[in-house]
Image (cartoon, rainbow, N blue to C red):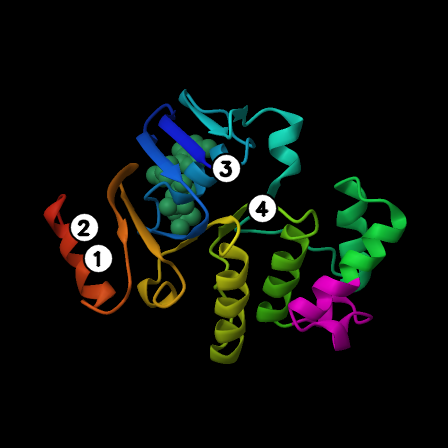
Amino acid sequence: MQLIIDRLTKQYLNAIAVDRVSLRLHKGVYGLLGANGAGKTTLMRMICGILKPTSGTVTCDGLTVSSEEYRAQLGYLPQDFGYYPDFTGMDFLLYMASLKGLSRSAARRKSVELLNTVSLQDQAKKKIKTYSGGMKQRLGIAQALLNDPNVLILDEPTAGLDPRERVRFRNLIADIGKNNIVLLSTHIVSDLEHIADTILMMKAGQLIYEGKWDGSHEDLEAFYLQQTKEEGENE
Ligand SMILES: Nc1ncnc2c1ncn2[C@@H]1O[C@H](COP(=O)(O)OP(=O)(O)OP(=O)(O)O)[C@@H](O)[C@H]1O
């Protein structure tokens, strides 16, 4: 499996949000780091086919981002996910499953399975408006997994998770990353330590670093600061 991003660019009237980003992603967990406004969300939305690039292409095993087949193998957790406060967690997953085209029986089976995966089984019948930030985030991750995606895109998935949830999240992502492509963004460097095996860094729309990260040789925070400094002025 290979996701190829080729000179992907998004130009707005007054700003270039993503500037000729090229990447080849294989199975594994990729952590996308960058300050607010670096272009992470714009890049992810183009990878998901929600936002049309100004130029450049995204393909997965030859499938273009606009094809049904590509969408069918994609899971996405947007940054500001619109939950329905009066839905229960279970109803929400069943609803999202129906939007993704799962049959009723498959939707029920998968929703129960995923509520367990994200440890929300005991809150499945409670309304989302009673959920904590971390619980909502876990529900968002569950909905992204409904169609067993080969490509999972998570925009700031660790926001709102407490330390215990963070460990659970890390284990879940590591597991999914064994056989799939997982790309997750954050502006909090420490959120990526022990999660991502490859680190990507963006600054002002450009990809300024791509490399394996085993966590052993250096402090990621210090490395990130050094990279962003070397590539331009301080933030
Ligand atoms: N619709 C838009 N019109 C004009 N400029 C935009 C638009 N969307 C994003 N931008 C600009 O593009 C740049 C990249 O934004 P983007 O949201 O992708 O950054 P980000 O790294 O995801 O930041 P954050 O962590 O705050 O979400 C920013 O300068 C932003 O102001």
Q: Which structural element holds mark 3?
A: helix
Labelled pair 1, 4 in contact (Cβ < 8 Å): no
Q: Position of residue 106 (x, y in %)?
A: 83, 51
**Residue bearing the label numbered 1:** 224
Q: What's under tag 3, amino acid-wise?
A: Arg
| Residue 116 covered by magenta stretch | yes
**Residue bearing the label numbered 2:** 228
Asked if 124 appears above or below 17 in the picture, the reply is below
Crowding at dot 2, Cα within 10 Å, few <14 / some 14-19 / many 20+, comes out as some
The CA distance from mark 2 to mark 1 is 6 Å
Crowding at dot 3, Cα within 10 Å, few <14 / some 14-19 / many 20+, comes out as some
User: Residue shown at 89%/52% (left/top)?
Assistant: 105
Q: Is mark 3 within 8 Å of ligand 1?
A: yes
**Residue bearing the label numbered 3:** 45
Q: Position of residue 107 (x, y in %)?
A: 82, 52
Q: What's under tag 1, amino acid-wise?
A: Tyr
For this orientation, the residue located farthest to the bottom is 164
- Image: magenta residue range: 112-131
The CA distance from mark 4 to mark 3 is 9 Å
